[in-house]
Image: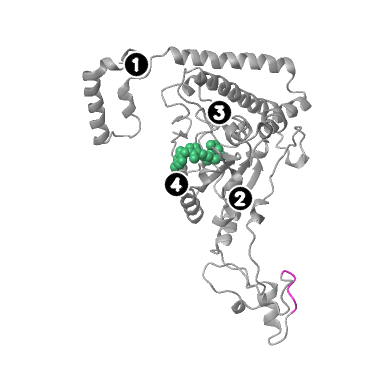
C-alpha cells in the first residue's frame, strides 16, 4: 500500500517548504567560529563564493519560509528544466528488465493476474465501444493504451486504500474484482462506484475529486487510521483550480495521499504541450515521473505525486473523433510499438510463463465472459425511475424528496409518453 509519509520523507517535505529546522551549525559555521575576523576557507558546497556567505547565518536571507541562499548573478529559472524530469521505468519496450536490482520479482501468478486484467479491460473496451456504435448503450470511454498504468498502480495498493478516480480508471476496479455485469449496470456508463471495493463514484466535472480526496486523506490522518488515499486525474484536469487547492492542502497538512497524474498526451483535443501539467515540487510534494506503459514502473508507491507518462490510443470518448486533431501515424506508433500489453506479453514470453495457445484460449474465454455479462445486463429491465434519487446521501435532503414526488406525479399524468415498460416498477 502507499504508506503515510515516513519520518524521513516528512522532514524532506518540511525542508522543501522551509518549515524544517535549518541545518546551519555544521562545518561551515564551525569554521567562522574558529577564526573570528579571518577569511574562512571556501565551502566545498558553495563553489561560487570567495568569502563563503554560508559560513555566517546573518548573511543568509532571513525571509520567513525561504530556505535559500542569496545569488549575485541575475539568472532566471528556466521552466523547461521541469519538462526534463526523467521517466522511471523497469522494462524496456521489448519487456526486458533493464536493471536487475529494480526488478520487483513478482511471482508468476501475480504477473499473470496483471496481464489478464489488462487484456480483459481491453476486451471489455472493444465490446462496449462497439455496442455504443450499434446504439445499444448511450456512451462509453475506452482505456486503450493506458492498461499498464491502471493495473500497475492498482497492484501497488492495499485493498482498503480509498480510490478517487476520474473516468478512465476502469482497470483499477477490474483489478479489485468488480464484476463485469456491474460495469454495465445501473450507473450512467463509465460513472462507476463501489463502496465494498473502496472506490468513490466517478463524477464528470473535472478535478472535483481532488479536494475531496485530500479531505478524505486528512480525515484518515486525524482518525489515525492506517489507510492511504489514491487520487487519479488526467494531465488536463491538473490545470483546474481544484487541483491546485488540493495539492496545496495536501502538502501543508501532510495528508496520506498519492496523487496519480496520468499524462496521456491529450485533454480531448488539447495536447499536453499546450498544458501545464502537475508540478509537484512547486507544492513541496515528493514527486516522480514514471513510464506508465511499463506495468512495473507504474507501481512505485512511495512518493506523493506520480506522473505516469502514457498515451490515449482511443478517441477521448464515443462523442469524439480524434482524427480531427492528431495523425494516424502518431496513434499507430503507440498502438504498434509502445503498447503496455505487448510489453508485458514480451516479459511473460521471456520467462516462459505464457505462450500462443494460452493467449488464444484466454482471448476466447475472456471475450465470452464479457459478452455473457453484456447480454445479461441487456436483458435486465432498467432500474425503476425513483432510484435516480437514492443512494447519494445517507439521508435524502428535502429538495431531492420534492423532486422525486414531482417525477412521480409527472409520470402518473404523462406516463404514456415514456417507454415505462422497459423500467422496473
Ligand atoms: C470542469 C470541467 N470542464 C470541462 C469538462 C469537459 N471535459 C471532459 S473530459 C475533458 C478533458 C480532460 O482531460 P484529461 O484530464 O487529460 O483526461 P483524459 O480525458 O485525457 O483521460 C474535458 C475538458 C468537464 N467535464 N469538466
Ligand atoms: Mg489526458
Would residue 224 be seen by someone viewing this image from the given angle? no
Would residue 376 be seen by someone viewing this image from the given angle? yes
Q: CA distance from mark 2 to mark 1?
A: 49 Å
Dot 1 or dot 3, earlier in sequence: 3
Q: Estimate how packed mark 2 is, as few (under 14), some (14 to 19) or many (20 or more) residues with alpha carbons within 10 Å.
A: many
Task: Say what secondary structure mark 4 lies in.
Answer: helix
- Mark in front: 3 vs 4: 3
| Residue pointed to by mark 4 | 211
Mark 1 in CB contact with mark 3 (< 8 angstroms): no
Dot 3 or dot 4, earlier in sequence: 3
Q: CA distance from mark 1 to mark 4?
A: 36 Å
| Residue pointed to by mark 2 | 287
| Residue pointed to by mark 1 | 423
Q: Nearer the viewer, residue 366 or 224?
A: 366
**Ligand 2 sits in which quadrant?**
top right
**Residue 26 location, x and y as percent?**
67, 71
Mark 2 in CB contact with mark 3 (< 8 angstroms): no
Q: In the image, is residue 43 part of the stretch drawn in magenta?
A: yes
Point out the residue furthest to the bottom here: 37
- Mark in front: 1 vs 4: 1
Q: CA distance from mark 2 to mark 3?
A: 28 Å
**Residue 205 location, x and y as percent?**
43, 39
Q: Estimate how packed mark 3 is, as few (under 14), some (14 to 19) or many (20 or more) residues with alpha carbons within 10 Å.
A: many
| Residue pointed to by mark 3 | 142
Mark 2 in CB contact with mark 1 (< 8 angstroms): no
Q: In the image, is residue 207 part of the stretch drawn in magenta?
A: no
Determine the main secondary structure of the stretch shown in magenta. loop
> Where 269 sits versus 344, above or below?
below
**How many marks do you count on the picture?**
4
Amino acid at each position: 500500500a502507499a504508506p503515510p509519509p515516513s519520518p524521513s520523507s516528512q522532514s524532506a517535505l518540511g525542508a522543501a517548504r522551509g518549515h524544517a529546522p535549518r541545518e546551519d551549525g555544521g562545518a561551515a559555521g564551525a569554521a567562522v567560529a574558529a577564526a573570528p575576523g579571518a577569511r574562512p576557507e571556501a565551502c566545498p558546497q558553495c563553489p561560487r563564493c570567495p568569502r563563503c556567505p554560508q559560513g555566517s547565518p546573518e548573511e543568509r536571507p532571513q525571509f520567513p519560509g525561504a530556505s535559500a541562499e542569496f545569488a549575485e548573478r541575475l539568472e532566471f529559472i528556466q521552466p523547461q528544466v521541469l519538462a526534463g524530469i526523467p521517466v522511471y521505468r523497469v522494462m524496456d519496450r521489448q519487456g526486458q528488465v533493464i536493471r536487475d536490482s529494480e526488478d520487483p520479482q513478482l511471482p508468476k501468478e501475480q504477473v499473470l493476474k496483471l496481464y489478464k486484467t489488462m487484456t480483459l479491460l481491453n476486451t471489455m473496451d472493444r465490446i462496449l465501444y462497439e455496442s455504443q456504435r450499434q446504439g445499444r448503450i448511450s456512451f462509453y470511454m475506452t482505456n486503450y493504451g493506458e492498461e499498464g498504468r491502471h493495473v500497475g498502480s492498482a497492484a501497488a495498493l492495499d485493498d482498503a486504500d480509498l480510490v478517487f478516480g476520474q473516468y478512465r480508471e476502469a482497470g483499477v476496479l477490474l483489478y479489485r474484482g468488480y464484476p463485469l455485469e456491474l460495469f454495465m449496470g445501473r450507473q450512467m456508463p463509465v460513472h462507476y462506484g463501489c463502496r465494498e471495493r473502496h472506490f468513490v463514484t466517478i463524477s464528470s466535472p473535472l478535478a472535483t475529486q481532488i479536494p475531496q480526496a485530500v479531505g478524505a486523506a486528512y480525515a484518515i490522518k486525524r482518525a489515525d487510521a492506517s489507510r492511504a488515499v489514491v487520487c487519479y486525474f488526467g494531465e488536463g484536469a491538473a490545470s483546474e483550480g481544484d487541483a491546485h487547492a488540493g495539492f496545496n492542502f495536501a502538502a501543508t497538512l501532510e495528508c496520506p495521499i498519492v496523487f496519480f497524474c496520468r499524462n496521456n498526451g491529450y485533454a480531448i483535443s488539447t495536447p499536453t504541450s499546450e498544458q501545464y501539467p502537475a508540478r509537484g515540487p512547486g507544492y513541496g510534494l515528493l514527486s516522480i515521473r514514471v513510464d506508465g506503459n511499463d506495468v512495473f514502473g507504474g507501481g512505485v508507491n512511495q512518493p506523493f505525486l506520480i506522473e505516469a507518462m502514457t498515451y490515449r490510443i482511443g478517441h477521448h470518448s464515443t462523442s469524439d473523433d480524434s482524427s480531427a486533431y492528431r495523425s494516424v501515424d502518431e496513434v499507430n506508433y503507440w498502438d504498434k510499438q509502445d503498447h503496455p500489453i505487448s510489453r508485458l506479453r514480451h516479459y511473460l514470453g521471456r520467462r516462459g510463463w505464457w505462450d500462443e495457445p494460452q493467449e488464444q484460449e484466454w482471448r476466447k474465454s475472456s471475450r465470452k465472459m464479457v459478452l455473457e455479462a453484456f447480454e445479461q445486463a441487456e436483458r435486465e429491465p432498467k432500474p425503476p425511475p425513483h432510484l435516480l434519487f437514492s443512494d447519494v446521501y445517507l439521508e435524502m435532503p428535502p429538495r431531492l424528496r420534492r423532486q422525486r414526488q414531482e417525477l412521480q406525479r409527472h409520470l402518473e399524468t404523462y406516463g404514456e409518453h415514456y417507454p415505462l415498460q422497459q423500467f422496473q416498477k
